[in-house]
Structures are given as C-alpha cells and as structure tokens.
Image (cartoon, rainbow, N blue to C red):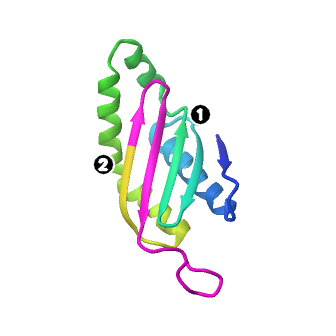
Amino acid sequence: MSVAATPQADSELNRAISAAMVELYAVFYEHDRTTATTYINDNIVVCVLENILTEGEDTLIAEGASGEVIDGRVGFQTDTEDEFTAAIERLTHRRVTAFLSANQTAPGVACELFFLDAAPLTAYGQVA
C-alpha cells in the first residue's frame, strides 16, 4: 500500500485522504496493491488511484470483458458512495455535495472526485 502527497500547504490532509481511499479499496476489493495521490483545490478533492484491478478483473480483461469490469466498478461506487463520502467529510470537516467516480481498465486506474460545500476557512476564520 503506497500513498503519495502533492506539494501543497496541507500535505498531511492529502496523505490522510489518500490513505483512506487506499484502505477503502483494500477492504472492498481485498487486495493491497492500490496506490493513491490526492489533490485539493478549494471545493474540490481529487484522488487518483493506480493498480486498482483485482486478479479476477485482470482475468476478465484478458478474456475481452473490460466492459463487464467497468460495469462492476460503477455498481461498486454506487453501492459504496456513503463510505467514500463519509471518509472525506470526516477528514475535511466539510460536507460532500457531489461524488463522481471514473475507472479505466488499461491501465487499471480510477479517479474519485468530491465536491465540498464551502471554501475552506483561513487562519482568521474567514472563507478563503
């Protein structure tokens, strides 16, 4: 399990989000190969995940069934949206207003995109 952070002021938060997404993938997909990099910009959190595919999905893709893998991934995100948004809300202390997920089988990558409710507060308690 590997987690990368972007060179931003709050790289600790980036690392925490990456770790949470990798952990969710490990729990739901039962493998620990996934790596993540998180980017945060105002009301947007983007987590890019690599090495997401299970051995079973790799087999399906090799057999020409990548569409089936993508369909399964879309179903997965629909079923687990609450867990993903809860992790982001817990870590950012902000409400997630929208969640989008995209997957690609070659290479096995995913992008988890979260829209947050308000701009982060500055050190003086005002909206940035």
Q: Residue 40, percent across and down?
A: 56, 59
For the point 49% across and 34% down, the residue is: 109
Q: Which residue is mark 2?
A: 78
Where the C terminus falls, by quadrant? bottom right
Return the x and y of residue 41 as percentages of the image width and height. Answer: 54, 61
Residue positioned most to the front: 128
Residue 29 x/y as whole percent: 46, 37
The question of residue 124 being in magenta is answered with: yes
CA neighbours of label 1 inside 10 A, class few (<14), some (14 to 19), many (20+): some
What count of labels does the image hold? 2
Element type at mark 2: helix
Tell me which amino acid carries mark 2. Answer: Thr
The quadrant where residue 59 appears: top left
Q: Which residue range is magenta in the image?
A: 102-128
Provide residue 39's location: percent of width, then percent of height: 57, 54
Is the N terminus in the top left, top right, bottom left or bottom right quadrant? top right
Q: Nearer the viewer, residue 29 or 52?
A: 52
The tag earlier along the polypeptide, 1 or 2, is 1
Direction from residue 66 to residue 27 in the image, left or right? right
Amino acid type at circle 1 is Arg
**Mark 1 → mark 2, Cα distance in angstroms:** 22 Å
